[in-house]
Image (cartoon, helix red, strand yellow):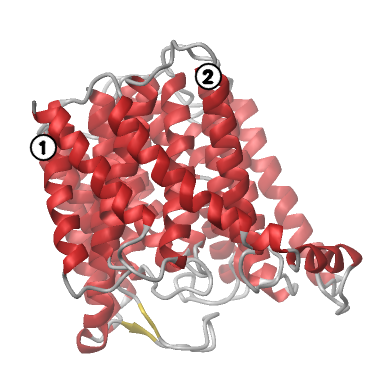
Amino acid sequence: MEQILFLITFISATVISMAVIPLMVRLAPALGMIDKPDQRKVHTVPVPRVGGVGIVIGSLLPILLWTPTEPWLLAYVSGAAVLLVFGIWDDIRELGHYTKFAGQIVAAVAVVYFGDVYITQLPFITLEGAQVAAIGKPFTVFAIVGMINAINTSDGLDGLAGGMSLLSLGCIAYLAFMADGGPSVMIATAALGGVFGFLRYNTHPARVFMGDGGSQFLGFTLGVLAVVLTQQVNPALNPVLPLLFLGLPIVDIVVVIVRRVRRGAKWYRAHKDHIHHRLLQLKFHHYEAVMIIYSIQMFFIASSIFLGYESDALLMSIYLGTSSLLFLFLTAAERNGWCAHSVSHVSSFAKVIHTIKSNRFFTAAPVYFVGIAIPVLFVAVALLAKHVPRDFGIIAAVMAATLAVYLVARIAVDSIIVQAVHYVIAAFVIYLETHHFGQRAPGFAILEVAYFSVLTGAIGLAIRYGEKQDFKITPMDYLVIFVVLFAGYILHSMPDRAEIGLMAAKLIVVFYGCELIVMRMRGKLNALNISALVALAVLAYRGLT
Protein backbone atom coordinates (compact mmCIF):
# COMPACT_ATOMS: atom_id res chain seq x y z
CA MET A 1 0.00 0.00 0.00
CA GLU A 2 2.93 2.32 0.75
CA GLN A 3 4.23 1.80 -2.78
CA ILE A 4 0.88 2.94 -4.22
CA LEU A 5 1.08 6.10 -2.11
CA PHE A 6 4.59 6.88 -3.38
CA LEU A 7 3.39 6.35 -6.94
CA ILE A 8 0.34 8.56 -6.46
CA THR A 9 2.52 11.23 -4.84
CA PHE A 10 4.91 11.27 -7.80
CA ILE A 11 2.11 11.37 -10.39
CA SER A 12 0.20 14.06 -8.49
CA ALA A 13 3.28 16.26 -8.12
CA THR A 14 4.13 15.85 -11.81
CA VAL A 15 0.62 16.68 -13.00
CA ILE A 16 0.24 19.66 -10.64
CA SER A 17 3.61 21.05 -11.71
CA MET A 18 2.74 20.63 -15.39
CA ALA A 19 -0.63 22.31 -14.84
CA VAL A 20 0.60 25.28 -12.80
CA ILE A 21 3.55 26.24 -15.02
CA PRO A 22 1.54 27.11 -18.22
CA LEU A 23 -0.81 29.20 -16.07
CA MET A 24 2.13 31.05 -14.53
CA VAL A 25 3.69 31.59 -17.96
CA ARG A 26 0.56 33.52 -18.98
CA LEU A 27 0.75 35.60 -15.80
CA ALA A 28 4.53 36.19 -15.98
CA PRO A 29 4.47 39.44 -18.04
CA ALA A 30 1.88 41.02 -15.74
CA LEU A 31 3.79 39.93 -12.64
CA GLY A 32 7.13 41.06 -14.03
CA MET A 33 8.60 37.56 -13.72
CA ILE A 34 10.57 37.66 -16.97
CA ASP A 35 14.28 36.84 -17.14
CA LYS A 36 15.83 39.33 -19.56
CA PRO A 37 19.20 38.63 -21.24
CA ASP A 38 22.34 40.37 -20.03
CA GLN A 39 26.10 39.93 -20.33
CA ARG A 40 26.39 37.28 -17.58
CA LYS A 41 23.52 35.12 -18.89
CA VAL A 42 23.50 32.50 -21.63
CA HIS A 43 20.00 32.99 -23.08
CA THR A 44 19.42 35.70 -25.70
CA VAL A 45 15.63 36.19 -25.52
CA PRO A 46 13.35 37.00 -22.55
CA VAL A 47 12.08 33.85 -20.80
CA PRO A 48 9.44 33.56 -18.03
CA ARG A 49 11.03 32.52 -14.72
CA VAL A 50 7.95 31.02 -13.11
CA GLY A 51 8.78 27.31 -13.19
CA GLY A 52 9.66 27.34 -9.51
CA VAL A 53 6.05 28.07 -8.58
CA GLY A 54 5.00 24.86 -10.34
CA ILE A 55 7.81 22.88 -8.71
CA VAL A 56 6.99 24.10 -5.19
CA ILE A 57 3.20 23.79 -5.41
CA GLY A 58 3.48 20.43 -7.15
CA SER A 59 5.82 19.18 -4.43
CA LEU A 60 4.11 20.58 -1.34
CA LEU A 61 0.45 19.77 -2.07
CA PRO A 62 0.92 15.95 -2.09
CA ILE A 63 3.09 16.23 1.04
CA LEU A 64 0.36 18.16 2.87
CA LEU A 65 -2.31 15.71 1.70
CA TRP A 66 -0.65 12.36 2.37
CA THR A 67 2.36 12.71 4.65
CA PRO A 68 1.83 12.08 8.40
CA THR A 69 2.31 15.26 10.43
CA GLU A 70 5.62 15.47 12.27
CA PRO A 71 7.32 18.54 13.80
CA TRP A 72 10.23 18.50 11.35
CA LEU A 73 7.83 18.17 8.40
CA LEU A 74 5.87 21.23 9.51
CA ALA A 75 9.15 23.13 9.92
CA TYR A 76 10.25 21.98 6.44
CA VAL A 77 6.98 23.10 4.80
CA SER A 78 7.16 26.45 6.63
CA GLY A 79 10.74 26.96 5.48
CA ALA A 80 9.82 26.04 1.91
CA ALA A 81 6.94 28.53 1.98
CA VAL A 82 9.29 31.29 3.21
CA LEU A 83 11.73 30.55 0.39
CA LEU A 84 8.93 30.54 -2.19
CA VAL A 85 7.82 34.01 -1.06
CA PHE A 86 11.37 35.39 -1.10
CA GLY A 87 12.07 33.61 -4.39
CA ILE A 88 9.03 35.06 -6.15
CA TRP A 89 9.86 38.46 -4.68
CA ASP A 90 13.38 38.20 -6.07
CA ASP A 91 12.15 36.99 -9.48
CA ILE A 92 9.96 40.09 -9.66
CA ARG A 93 12.22 42.80 -8.18
CA GLU A 94 15.79 41.39 -8.02
CA LEU A 95 16.38 41.49 -4.27
CA GLY A 96 19.75 42.33 -2.79
CA HIS A 97 22.00 39.51 -1.64
CA TYR A 98 21.55 40.23 2.07
CA THR A 99 17.76 40.16 1.79
CA LYS A 100 17.94 36.81 0.05
CA PHE A 101 20.33 35.48 2.70
CA ALA A 102 17.87 36.60 5.39
CA GLY A 103 15.09 34.51 3.87
CA GLN A 104 17.39 31.52 3.50
CA ILE A 105 18.54 31.75 7.12
CA VAL A 106 14.95 31.98 8.37
CA ALA A 107 14.06 28.81 6.44
CA ALA A 108 17.13 26.92 7.67
CA VAL A 109 16.67 28.02 11.29
CA ALA A 110 13.04 26.84 11.20
CA VAL A 111 14.11 23.32 10.28
CA VAL A 112 17.14 23.13 12.56
CA TYR A 113 15.90 24.82 15.73
CA PHE A 114 12.14 24.13 15.51
CA GLY A 115 12.19 20.89 13.53
CA ASP A 116 15.23 19.57 15.46
CA VAL A 117 16.95 18.47 12.26
CA TYR A 118 20.70 18.89 12.56
CA ILE A 119 24.01 17.17 11.97
CA THR A 120 25.30 15.00 14.81
CA GLN A 121 28.11 13.24 12.91
CA LEU A 122 30.91 14.92 10.99
CA PRO A 123 33.61 13.30 8.84
CA PHE A 124 36.91 12.69 10.66
CA ILE A 125 35.51 14.38 13.81
CA THR A 126 33.67 12.89 16.80
CA LEU A 127 31.23 15.21 18.55
CA GLU A 128 30.42 14.41 22.16
CA GLY A 129 28.00 15.70 24.79
CA ALA A 130 27.19 19.39 24.55
CA GLN A 131 29.30 19.71 21.39
CA VAL A 132 26.70 17.85 19.35
CA ALA A 133 24.06 20.57 19.52
CA ALA A 134 26.44 23.52 20.06
CA ILE A 135 28.39 22.74 16.89
CA GLY A 136 25.91 20.64 14.94
CA LYS A 137 23.03 23.14 14.80
CA PRO A 138 24.92 26.24 13.58
CA PHE A 139 26.87 24.09 11.14
CA THR A 140 23.62 22.63 9.77
CA VAL A 141 22.16 26.11 9.22
CA PHE A 142 25.35 27.06 7.37
CA ALA A 143 25.26 23.85 5.29
CA ILE A 144 21.60 24.24 4.29
CA VAL A 145 22.09 27.90 3.32
CA GLY A 146 25.17 26.85 1.37
CA MET A 147 23.20 24.16 -0.48
CA ILE A 148 20.44 26.62 -1.31
CA ASN A 149 22.98 28.92 -2.97
CA ALA A 150 24.82 26.03 -4.62
CA ILE A 151 21.69 24.99 -6.55
CA ASN A 152 20.71 28.62 -7.12
CA THR A 153 24.02 29.44 -8.79
CA SER A 154 24.09 26.19 -10.79
CA ASP A 155 20.86 27.21 -12.53
CA GLY A 156 22.66 28.62 -15.55
CA LEU A 157 21.80 26.31 -18.46
CA ASP A 158 18.54 24.80 -19.65
CA GLY A 159 17.78 21.66 -17.65
CA LEU A 160 21.00 21.81 -15.61
CA ALA A 161 19.86 22.56 -12.04
CA GLY A 162 16.65 20.59 -12.52
CA GLY A 163 18.47 17.55 -13.91
CA MET A 164 21.14 17.50 -11.21
CA SER A 165 18.48 17.91 -8.53
CA LEU A 166 16.47 15.09 -10.07
CA LEU A 167 19.45 12.75 -9.82
CA SER A 168 20.18 13.72 -6.21
CA LEU A 169 16.53 13.43 -5.18
CA GLY A 170 16.30 10.01 -6.82
CA CYS A 171 19.34 8.83 -4.87
CA ILE A 172 17.94 10.16 -1.58
CA ALA A 173 14.54 8.59 -2.26
CA TYR A 174 16.17 5.21 -2.95
CA LEU A 175 18.43 5.26 0.12
CA ALA A 176 15.57 6.41 2.35
CA PHE A 177 13.22 3.79 0.91
CA MET A 178 15.74 1.03 1.59
CA ALA A 179 15.87 2.21 5.23
CA ASP A 180 12.06 2.49 5.53
CA GLY A 181 12.20 6.27 5.97
CA GLY A 182 8.58 6.90 4.95
CA PRO A 183 8.19 10.70 5.33
CA SER A 184 11.58 11.45 3.78
CA VAL A 185 10.72 9.18 0.84
CA MET A 186 7.44 11.06 0.41
CA ILE A 187 9.19 14.44 0.32
CA ALA A 188 11.84 13.21 -2.11
CA THR A 189 9.20 11.55 -4.32
CA ALA A 190 7.02 14.67 -4.35
CA ALA A 191 10.00 16.87 -5.23
CA LEU A 192 10.96 14.39 -7.97
CA GLY A 193 7.49 14.77 -9.48
CA GLY A 194 7.62 18.56 -9.25
CA VAL A 195 11.00 18.68 -11.02
CA PHE A 196 9.98 16.07 -13.60
CA GLY A 197 6.94 18.14 -14.57
CA PHE A 198 9.10 21.27 -14.80
CA LEU A 199 11.77 19.66 -17.00
CA ARG A 200 9.15 19.10 -19.67
CA TYR A 201 9.28 22.88 -20.22
CA ASN A 202 12.94 23.46 -19.37
CA THR A 203 14.80 21.15 -21.79
CA HIS A 204 16.90 23.16 -24.26
CA PRO A 205 15.69 25.46 -25.70
CA ALA A 206 13.82 26.23 -22.48
CA ARG A 207 10.34 27.75 -22.59
CA VAL A 208 10.50 28.61 -18.89
CA PHE A 209 13.12 29.00 -16.13
CA MET A 210 12.65 27.88 -12.54
CA GLY A 211 13.86 31.21 -11.15
CA ASP A 212 14.98 31.74 -7.56
CA GLY A 213 11.65 30.42 -6.30
CA GLY A 214 12.48 26.98 -7.70
CA SER A 215 16.25 26.81 -7.27
CA GLN A 216 16.15 27.89 -3.62
CA PHE A 217 13.39 25.39 -2.86
CA LEU A 218 15.35 22.55 -4.46
CA GLY A 219 18.56 23.46 -2.64
CA PHE A 220 16.65 23.69 0.64
CA THR A 221 14.90 20.35 0.06
CA LEU A 222 18.14 18.59 -0.85
CA GLY A 223 19.96 20.04 2.15
CA VAL A 224 17.23 19.07 4.61
CA LEU A 225 16.77 15.58 3.17
CA ALA A 226 20.52 14.95 3.21
CA VAL A 227 20.60 15.69 6.96
CA VAL A 228 17.45 13.68 7.72
CA LEU A 229 18.69 10.69 5.70
CA THR A 230 22.18 10.44 7.19
CA GLN A 231 21.44 11.60 10.75
CA GLN A 232 17.98 10.17 11.45
CA VAL A 233 16.71 7.68 8.86
CA ASN A 234 19.96 5.72 8.51
CA PRO A 235 22.80 7.00 10.75
CA ALA A 236 24.93 4.04 9.63
CA LEU A 237 25.51 5.80 6.31
CA ASN A 238 28.86 7.53 6.05
CA PRO A 239 28.65 11.27 6.97
CA VAL A 240 30.68 12.11 3.83
CA LEU A 241 27.92 10.64 1.65
CA PRO A 242 25.96 13.93 1.17
CA LEU A 243 28.99 15.37 -0.63
CA LEU A 244 28.68 12.60 -3.21
CA PHE A 245 24.94 12.52 -3.82
CA LEU A 246 24.61 16.32 -3.72
CA GLY A 247 27.55 16.36 -6.08
CA LEU A 248 29.02 19.08 -8.26
CA PRO A 249 27.03 22.14 -7.10
CA ILE A 250 28.89 22.08 -3.75
CA VAL A 251 32.45 22.01 -5.08
CA ASP A 252 31.47 24.39 -7.90
CA ILE A 253 30.32 27.16 -5.57
CA VAL A 254 33.37 26.70 -3.32
CA VAL A 255 35.78 26.99 -6.26
CA VAL A 256 33.90 29.98 -7.67
CA ILE A 257 34.07 31.84 -4.34
CA VAL A 258 37.81 31.12 -4.04
CA ARG A 259 38.47 32.34 -7.61
CA ARG A 260 36.51 35.55 -7.01
CA VAL A 261 38.24 36.31 -3.72
CA ARG A 262 41.68 35.69 -5.27
CA ARG A 263 41.06 38.25 -8.02
CA GLY A 264 39.63 40.78 -5.55
CA ALA A 265 36.01 40.55 -6.70
CA LYS A 266 33.02 40.39 -4.37
CA TRP A 267 32.44 36.70 -3.62
CA TYR A 268 28.64 36.99 -3.97
CA ARG A 269 28.69 38.97 -7.22
CA ALA A 270 27.43 36.86 -10.17
CA HIS A 271 29.87 36.23 -12.99
CA LYS A 272 30.50 33.66 -15.73
CA ASP A 273 32.95 31.48 -13.82
CA HIS A 274 30.87 28.41 -12.93
CA ILE A 275 31.64 25.01 -14.45
CA HIS A 276 28.91 25.34 -17.09
CA HIS A 277 30.15 28.79 -18.13
CA ARG A 278 33.71 27.51 -18.49
CA LEU A 279 32.57 24.56 -20.62
CA LEU A 280 30.70 26.93 -22.93
CA GLN A 281 33.79 29.15 -23.18
CA LEU A 282 35.68 26.07 -24.39
CA LYS A 283 33.13 25.94 -27.25
CA PHE A 284 31.18 22.92 -26.06
CA HIS A 285 27.62 23.06 -27.31
CA HIS A 286 24.90 23.84 -24.78
CA TYR A 287 23.62 20.26 -24.65
CA GLU A 288 27.19 18.88 -24.48
CA ALA A 289 28.02 21.00 -21.43
CA VAL A 290 24.87 19.82 -19.67
CA MET A 291 25.57 16.17 -20.52
CA ILE A 292 29.17 16.41 -19.26
CA ILE A 293 27.94 17.73 -15.91
CA TYR A 294 25.16 15.12 -15.81
CA SER A 295 27.75 12.38 -16.40
CA ILE A 296 29.89 13.46 -13.45
CA GLN A 297 26.81 13.80 -11.26
CA MET A 298 25.74 10.29 -12.30
CA PHE A 299 29.12 8.92 -11.27
CA PHE A 300 28.73 10.55 -7.85
CA ILE A 301 25.21 9.13 -7.51
CA ALA A 302 26.36 5.60 -8.40
CA SER A 303 29.23 5.88 -5.93
CA SER A 304 26.80 6.99 -3.21
CA ILE A 305 24.57 3.99 -3.69
CA PHE A 306 27.30 1.35 -3.89
CA LEU A 307 29.75 2.82 -1.33
CA GLY A 308 27.46 4.32 1.28
CA TYR A 309 29.04 2.44 4.19
CA GLU A 310 32.71 2.77 3.22
CA SER A 311 35.33 4.85 5.04
CA ASP A 312 35.45 8.64 5.26
CA ALA A 313 38.80 8.66 3.48
CA LEU A 314 37.62 6.60 0.51
CA LEU A 315 34.47 8.65 -0.13
CA MET A 316 36.28 11.94 0.33
CA SER A 317 39.00 10.77 -2.07
CA ILE A 318 36.43 9.89 -4.72
CA TYR A 319 34.71 13.25 -4.40
CA LEU A 320 37.79 15.45 -4.27
CA GLY A 321 39.72 13.34 -6.78
CA THR A 322 36.96 13.46 -9.42
CA SER A 323 36.35 17.17 -8.83
CA SER A 324 40.07 17.92 -9.03
CA LEU A 325 40.38 16.13 -12.36
CA LEU A 326 37.51 18.18 -13.75
CA PHE A 327 39.01 21.51 -12.67
CA LEU A 328 42.48 20.50 -13.83
CA PHE A 329 41.03 19.78 -17.26
CA LEU A 330 39.20 23.12 -17.36
CA THR A 331 42.27 25.07 -16.26
CA ALA A 332 44.65 23.31 -18.67
CA ALA A 333 42.22 23.71 -21.58
CA GLU A 334 41.72 27.42 -20.86
CA ARG A 335 45.46 28.11 -20.59
CA ASN A 336 46.23 26.28 -23.84
CA GLY A 337 43.37 27.83 -25.80
CA TRP A 338 41.79 24.44 -26.49
CA CYS A 339 38.38 24.39 -28.18
CA ALA A 340 35.90 21.52 -28.32
CA HIS A 341 34.77 22.33 -31.87
CA SER A 342 37.56 24.15 -33.66
CA VAL A 343 36.70 22.85 -37.14
CA SER A 344 33.25 22.65 -38.70
CA HIS A 345 32.69 19.49 -40.68
CA VAL A 346 30.13 16.75 -41.21
CA SER A 347 31.44 13.41 -40.02
CA SER A 348 31.00 10.15 -41.91
CA PHE A 349 28.87 8.88 -39.04
CA ALA A 350 26.54 11.88 -39.38
CA LYS A 351 26.20 11.16 -43.12
CA VAL A 352 25.22 7.56 -42.37
CA ILE A 353 22.63 8.79 -39.86
CA HIS A 354 21.09 11.15 -42.42
CA THR A 355 20.90 8.29 -44.92
CA ILE A 356 19.14 6.07 -42.39
CA LYS A 357 16.69 8.82 -41.52
CA SER A 358 15.51 8.97 -45.12
CA ASN A 359 14.31 5.35 -44.88
CA ARG A 360 10.59 5.17 -44.11
CA PHE A 361 11.10 2.19 -41.83
CA PHE A 362 12.96 4.41 -39.36
CA THR A 363 10.56 7.36 -39.63
CA ALA A 364 7.01 6.02 -39.86
CA ALA A 365 6.92 2.40 -38.67
CA PRO A 366 8.08 3.08 -35.07
CA VAL A 367 5.44 5.80 -34.63
CA TYR A 368 2.68 3.47 -35.86
CA PHE A 369 3.89 0.71 -33.56
CA VAL A 370 3.90 2.95 -30.47
CA GLY A 371 0.47 4.30 -31.44
CA ILE A 372 -0.92 0.76 -31.35
CA ALA A 373 1.16 -0.89 -28.60
CA ILE A 374 0.30 1.50 -25.77
CA PRO A 375 -3.50 1.58 -26.37
CA VAL A 376 -3.49 -2.24 -26.50
CA LEU A 377 -1.56 -2.32 -23.20
CA PHE A 378 -4.08 0.00 -21.52
CA VAL A 379 -7.12 -2.04 -22.49
CA ALA A 380 -5.53 -5.48 -22.00
CA VAL A 381 -4.33 -4.77 -18.46
CA ALA A 382 -7.64 -3.16 -17.46
CA LEU A 383 -9.52 -6.26 -18.63
CA LEU A 384 -7.12 -8.99 -17.49
CA ALA A 385 -5.67 -7.73 -14.18
CA LYS A 386 -6.61 -10.17 -11.42
CA HIS A 387 -7.54 -7.45 -8.91
CA VAL A 388 -8.30 -3.73 -9.07
CA PRO A 389 -8.03 -1.83 -5.73
CA ARG A 390 -11.05 0.23 -4.75
CA ASP A 391 -8.92 3.40 -4.61
CA PHE A 392 -8.03 2.83 -8.25
CA GLY A 393 -11.71 2.40 -9.06
CA ILE A 394 -12.67 5.73 -7.50
CA ILE A 395 -9.87 7.68 -9.19
CA ALA A 396 -10.50 5.91 -12.51
CA ALA A 397 -14.18 6.91 -12.39
CA VAL A 398 -13.24 10.57 -11.88
CA MET A 399 -10.62 10.41 -14.65
CA ALA A 400 -13.03 8.69 -17.04
CA ALA A 401 -15.63 11.42 -16.50
CA THR A 402 -12.95 14.09 -16.95
CA LEU A 403 -11.72 12.56 -20.19
CA ALA A 404 -15.26 12.15 -21.53
CA VAL A 405 -15.96 15.84 -20.94
CA TYR A 406 -12.65 16.73 -22.61
CA LEU A 407 -13.49 14.72 -25.72
CA VAL A 408 -16.69 16.70 -26.31
CA ALA A 409 -15.44 20.12 -25.16
CA ARG A 410 -13.61 22.73 -27.21
CA ILE A 411 -10.23 22.23 -25.61
CA ALA A 412 -6.84 22.01 -27.33
CA VAL A 413 -5.75 18.56 -28.49
CA ASP A 414 -2.63 18.61 -26.30
CA SER A 415 -4.38 20.07 -23.25
CA ILE A 416 -2.84 19.50 -19.84
CA ILE A 417 -6.08 17.72 -18.94
CA VAL A 418 -5.53 14.88 -21.37
CA GLN A 419 -1.84 14.68 -20.46
CA ALA A 420 -2.77 14.29 -16.79
CA VAL A 421 -5.27 11.55 -17.64
CA HIS A 422 -2.69 9.69 -19.72
CA TYR A 423 -0.16 9.85 -16.88
CA VAL A 424 -2.70 8.53 -14.36
CA ILE A 425 -3.89 5.64 -16.52
CA ALA A 426 -0.27 4.78 -17.40
CA ALA A 427 0.66 4.65 -13.71
CA PHE A 428 -2.37 2.48 -12.88
CA VAL A 429 -1.72 0.13 -15.77
CA ILE A 430 1.96 -0.36 -14.93
CA TYR A 431 1.16 -0.98 -11.26
CA LEU A 432 -1.54 -3.53 -12.11
CA GLU A 433 0.59 -5.19 -14.78
CA THR A 434 3.42 -5.57 -12.26
CA HIS A 435 1.35 -6.73 -9.27
CA HIS A 436 -1.92 -8.21 -10.48
CA PHE A 437 -1.35 -9.58 -13.94
CA GLY A 438 -0.52 -13.05 -15.19
CA GLN A 439 3.04 -13.33 -13.99
CA ARG A 440 2.64 -17.03 -13.32
CA ALA A 441 1.36 -17.86 -16.76
CA PRO A 442 3.85 -19.82 -18.91
CA GLY A 443 5.95 -17.51 -21.03
CA PHE A 444 4.59 -14.28 -19.46
CA ALA A 445 8.00 -13.03 -18.33
CA ILE A 446 9.46 -13.52 -21.83
CA LEU A 447 6.47 -11.77 -23.42
CA GLU A 448 6.76 -8.86 -20.97
CA VAL A 449 10.48 -8.37 -21.62
CA ALA A 450 9.94 -8.62 -25.38
CA TYR A 451 7.06 -6.12 -25.33
CA PHE A 452 8.85 -3.42 -23.33
CA SER A 453 12.14 -3.96 -25.16
CA VAL A 454 10.50 -3.49 -28.56
CA LEU A 455 8.43 -0.58 -27.26
CA THR A 456 11.55 1.14 -25.89
CA GLY A 457 13.36 0.63 -29.20
CA ALA A 458 10.40 1.93 -31.20
CA ILE A 459 10.10 5.04 -29.02
CA GLY A 460 13.83 5.69 -29.37
CA LEU A 461 13.67 5.36 -33.16
CA ALA A 462 10.56 7.52 -33.38
CA ILE A 463 12.04 10.29 -31.26
CA ARG A 464 15.43 10.19 -32.94
CA TYR A 465 14.46 9.66 -36.58
CA GLY A 466 10.78 10.56 -36.76
CA GLU A 467 11.36 14.30 -37.10
CA LYS A 468 13.65 16.44 -39.24
CA GLN A 469 16.33 17.40 -36.77
CA ASP A 470 20.07 17.07 -36.31
CA PHE A 471 21.18 13.78 -34.85
CA LYS A 472 21.97 14.24 -31.17
CA ILE A 473 20.63 12.84 -27.94
CA THR A 474 19.20 15.56 -25.72
CA PRO A 475 20.25 15.95 -22.08
CA MET A 476 16.73 14.98 -20.99
CA ASP A 477 16.93 11.76 -23.03
CA TYR A 478 20.32 11.04 -21.49
CA LEU A 479 19.01 11.67 -17.99
CA VAL A 480 15.97 9.44 -18.42
CA ILE A 481 17.99 6.62 -19.98
CA PHE A 482 20.37 6.66 -17.01
CA VAL A 483 17.53 6.67 -14.48
CA VAL A 484 15.74 3.80 -16.20
CA LEU A 485 18.79 1.58 -16.64
CA PHE A 486 20.36 2.31 -13.27
CA ALA A 487 17.11 1.92 -11.32
CA GLY A 488 16.47 -1.42 -12.95
CA TYR A 489 20.02 -2.59 -12.29
CA ILE A 490 20.32 -1.72 -8.62
CA LEU A 491 16.95 -3.25 -7.75
CA HIS A 492 17.17 -6.33 -9.93
CA SER A 493 19.19 -8.30 -7.37
CA MET A 494 16.75 -7.55 -4.52
CA PRO A 495 13.73 -9.89 -4.73
CA ASP A 496 11.67 -7.83 -2.27
CA ARG A 497 12.48 -4.54 -4.02
CA ALA A 498 13.02 -5.54 -7.66
CA GLU A 499 9.49 -4.68 -8.70
CA ILE A 500 10.04 -1.00 -7.77
CA GLY A 501 12.87 -0.61 -10.26
CA LEU A 502 10.93 -2.47 -12.95
CA MET A 503 7.86 -0.34 -12.35
CA ALA A 504 9.88 2.87 -12.61
CA ALA A 505 11.57 1.75 -15.82
CA LYS A 506 8.32 0.62 -17.46
CA LEU A 507 6.45 3.71 -16.32
CA ILE A 508 8.99 6.11 -17.83
CA VAL A 509 8.92 4.17 -21.12
CA VAL A 510 5.11 4.41 -21.26
CA PHE A 511 5.23 8.12 -20.32
CA TYR A 512 7.55 8.77 -23.25
CA GLY A 513 5.27 6.72 -25.51
CA CYS A 514 2.22 8.74 -24.48
CA GLU A 515 4.09 12.01 -25.05
CA LEU A 516 5.14 10.80 -28.49
CA ILE A 517 1.57 9.92 -29.46
CA VAL A 518 0.19 13.22 -28.13
CA MET A 519 2.78 15.18 -30.14
CA ARG A 520 1.68 13.50 -33.35
CA MET A 521 -2.07 13.09 -32.92
CA ARG A 522 -4.24 15.39 -35.01
CA GLY A 523 -7.62 15.00 -33.32
CA LYS A 524 -9.17 14.02 -30.03
CA LEU A 525 -10.77 10.80 -31.24
CA ASN A 526 -7.54 8.84 -31.57
CA ALA A 527 -6.51 5.40 -30.37
CA LEU A 528 -4.77 6.70 -27.23
CA ASN A 529 -7.70 8.75 -25.94
CA ILE A 530 -10.28 6.09 -26.76
CA SER A 531 -8.24 3.30 -25.19
CA ALA A 532 -7.63 5.46 -22.09
CA LEU A 533 -11.37 6.10 -21.76
CA VAL A 534 -12.21 2.41 -22.17
CA ALA A 535 -9.51 1.33 -19.73
CA LEU A 536 -10.58 3.87 -17.12
CA ALA A 537 -14.22 2.83 -17.44
CA VAL A 538 -13.28 -0.84 -17.00
CA LEU A 539 -11.06 -0.08 -13.99
CA ALA A 540 -13.79 2.05 -12.44
CA TYR A 541 -16.35 -0.74 -12.85
CA ARG A 542 -14.05 -3.47 -11.57
CA GLY A 543 -12.72 -1.42 -8.66
CA LEU A 544 -16.14 -0.30 -7.45
CA THR A 545 -18.02 -3.61 -7.81
- Label 1 CA crowd tier, 10 Å (few <14, some 14–19, many 20+): some
Query: In the figure, residue 19 lies in which quadrant?
Result: bottom left
Relative horizontal placement of residue 203, taking residue 116 as reference (left or right): right
Q: Quadrant of the C terminus?
A: top left
Give the percent coordinates (x, y) of residue 363.
65, 62
Is 122 or 103 nearer to us in this picture? 103
Q: Please, what secondary structure does the residue beneath circle 1 have? A: helix
Query: In the figure, residue 197 lies in which quadrant?
Result: bottom left
Q: Amino acid at mark 2?
A: Ala
- Residue 193 appears in view: yes
Give the percent coordinates (x, y) of residue 171.
46, 36
- Disc number at residue 394? 1
Residue beneath label 2, please?
Answer: 445
- Residue at image location 52% in from the left, 27% down from the top: 448
Note whether 115 is above or below 221 in the view shown: above
Note whether 152 is above or below 208 in the view shown: above
Q: Amino acid at mark 1?
A: Ile
Give the percent coordinates (x, y) of residue 190.
28, 44
- Residue 195 appears in view: no
